[in-house]
Image (spheres, rainbow, N blue to C red):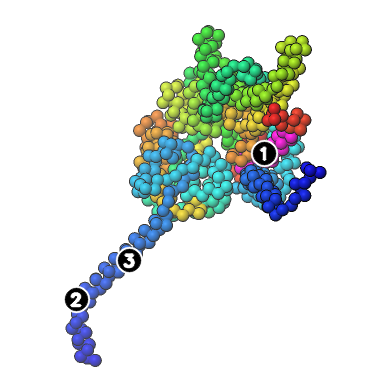
Amino acid sequence: MAAEEPAEVSSPLIRRRRARLDLTTPSLLGLPLGWLVVFFLIPIGILGAYSVNALYVSIYPGAHPVTLSAWRDFLDGSDDLRLFWKSVKMSLIVSGLCVVLAYPVAYFLALSGTKRKYVLLLVLIAPFLTSYLLRVLAWKVILGSQGVVNSFLFWTGLRSPDDPVSQLLYSRFAVMLVLLYVWIPFVALPIFVSLESLDRRLLEAASDLGASRWQAFWRVTLPLSVPGVVAAFLFVFIPTVGEFVTPSLVGGTSGYMYGNDIADQFNRSLDWQTGSVLALFLLGVVALLTVLFARFLQIRQVTTG
Amino acid sequence: MSDGQDLMERRLSREDLLKLAAVAGGAGLLAGRASVAGAALDRLAQESGRLQVLDWAGYGYDGGQAMFVQYVKKYPNEKPRFTLMTSESNALAQMSAGLEPDVVRPYVGYVRDFAESGFVQPWNPKLISNLKYLNPNMVKAGKYKGKQYGIPADWGFDALLYRTDKVKPKEFSWSLLLDERYAGKISWWDDLYMLVVAGYYLGIKDPWQQTTAELKRSQKLLASKKHVVKFFWSDEYVMQGAFAAGDIWIAYAWPADWAAMKAKGLKVRYVHPKEGAISWIGMLMQGNDTPRPEHAHAYVDAWSSRKSGSWLEDNYAYGHANTLSRPKSKDLLRALQLTNPNALKEPNAHIDRYIPNRQEYAKRWREVKAA
């Protein structure tokens, strides 16, 4: 009864305070919500209008009726759809490798107990201080026919200067290698956060119960770091599946990805209708995957620890 | 009355009347000039603000300043501002998205597309003093429905560039771009014009107006030979870098690429295929809603001068529409065939032109890339 007493008191002062409190939430949420509406929802609506020709940009003569033809063409097993799956596969491989390679680094930083872990973490993400474009272009110097790798092979005599390894650059391999390099530091961060918030007493308990270090890792550390791993995986997968800068710089004909296709639709073919269909489809798939991962793997644990 | 008339005659003799007329006429003339000058000043005042130019890389302050230096001298405080375009489609996309350039440069095949788009308006030829020195055939190519929509500026060829120390062509043909012996060392231009090239190679009657069946043949050929291609280039500097680094030995190229590779000391040759090179002409067009028409005309006039033309030829190895312009290099003079009056005509070269079903060409080219 005593706990209910304040609720029964309804002086004008308290009512004013409540009214003020009620306004706090919308005012705090207003800016981000407004931002989302203006820069996310409205552009998506515009893309939707372009995708059915309700809006159009065209130099081509003739009528431009509202139509679902671009959606039909896309879903009828077009090259675009095949290209999408190719990009998904490449992105899955890159994301998987990123996680596998970044995990040991994050593990060492989080659990080794080194005092300089934050300095090392800063070193790890130092490449982010330079331009993305420069980091990608640097690989042309490394992988080219007269690049660092081939020069080394010439020097060791493993290859003749007349016969360099030409598959290194302008290939699918080059795209995946560069994406891997670019995204590894980014992947290490959520895994690091996840591991660092791990309750060490659980590891001690596992040890007390006779688990080896490997068993403790396998049965305790890894399962508890899964939310971080999933977040890291998504952090790479989402941007790389629509990537177009790296493939256009080092991809060649075989490294052409879905993102390049979208860019070409808007910039070269002036087919904004098909471009919008491709962009919306990508957005839909990525959103769906994100929701699924978040729902089944409780990604919120990454932040709550 | 008679007294009055006498007085009048006495006061205004014939000589006096002439003097009066002269004074009145002079005053009128001065007044007229003043009003014309005032109008011009008013127009210039209305035209204040920097000229907006939508142009390709290399034609602005990134190396091309010498070609509009005359304009900058005339308007030293109103230097032009540049926005880059990467293709005609890209330019149209930017204009559709709200960019309102005073001057834009599509190539000759797009004159009709741009004219019909409503984004450009015809020039006033009387305001371009250098127009009389421009190649009349090129000037004619800039007309649409009798109006001068395009002022020709730069021109050149699309032909074959190859390393003479690495490549032994069986014949000088577009087939060199499909040659299996050099798989992985070839670069094609990233443009629907590759379907035109395929059309010429396949002997299609009119490669610029291919039927759907013909386009399918061209597309099939390109898709079947895509594996020999290292990459499609859309930025010539990227292609030049790869060529210089030895990543590619054969390329679909422009004269400037040949000049750049020669300057790097590479053993290269630039040849016209037996099917005929494709020739192109840059067309300066005036934005439809330009608030600076006099500035735009002055800018184009500067680009059309003999000096600008010679500089373009000497430094970029492109031809220039001004017939008085000549490059210093005799090699370039031969490569551009500047002494050949039929250099840009059939069958020596196929001048870039309007493609009625460009949309289908674009779609099929994209399918080649995505295949």
Give the chain of mark 2: B
Is B117 in front, or is A105?
A105
Task: Estimate the spatial distance between the alpha carbons at disc 1 and disc 3, rounded to whole Å.
Answer: 61 Å
Give the chain of mark 1: A
The quadrant in which residue B313 appears is top left
**Is residue A279 covered in magenta?**
yes
Is A219 in front, or is A60?
A219
Q: Is residue B139 visible?
A: no
Q: Is residue B249 left or right of residue A62?
A: left
Give the chain of mark 3: B
Magenta region: which residues? A269-293
Residue kind at label 3, given as amino acid type: Gly
Q: Position of residue B197 (x, y in %)?
A: 58, 34
The quarter of the rendered structure image containing the N terminus of chain B is bottom left
Of the residues under marks 2 and 3, which one precedes in the sequence?
Answer: 2
The crowding category of the residue bearing disc 3, from other C-alpha atoms within 10 Å (few below 14, some 14 to 19, many at least 20), is few
Is B97 in front, or is B90?
B97
Label 1 belongs to which residue? A279
The disc label shown at residue B32, or none:
3
* Callout 3: SS: helix
Q: Position of residue B21 (x, y in %)?
A: 25, 73
Q: Is residue B328 left or right of residue B269?
A: left
Q: Main secondary structure of the magenta part?
A: helix
Tell me which residue sits at (52%, 8%) in the image. Answer: A156
Tell me which residue sits at (20%, 87%) in the image. Answer: B6
Residue kind at label 2, given as amino acid type: Glu
Is A111 in front, or is B195?
A111
Residue kind at label 1, given as amino acid type: Ala
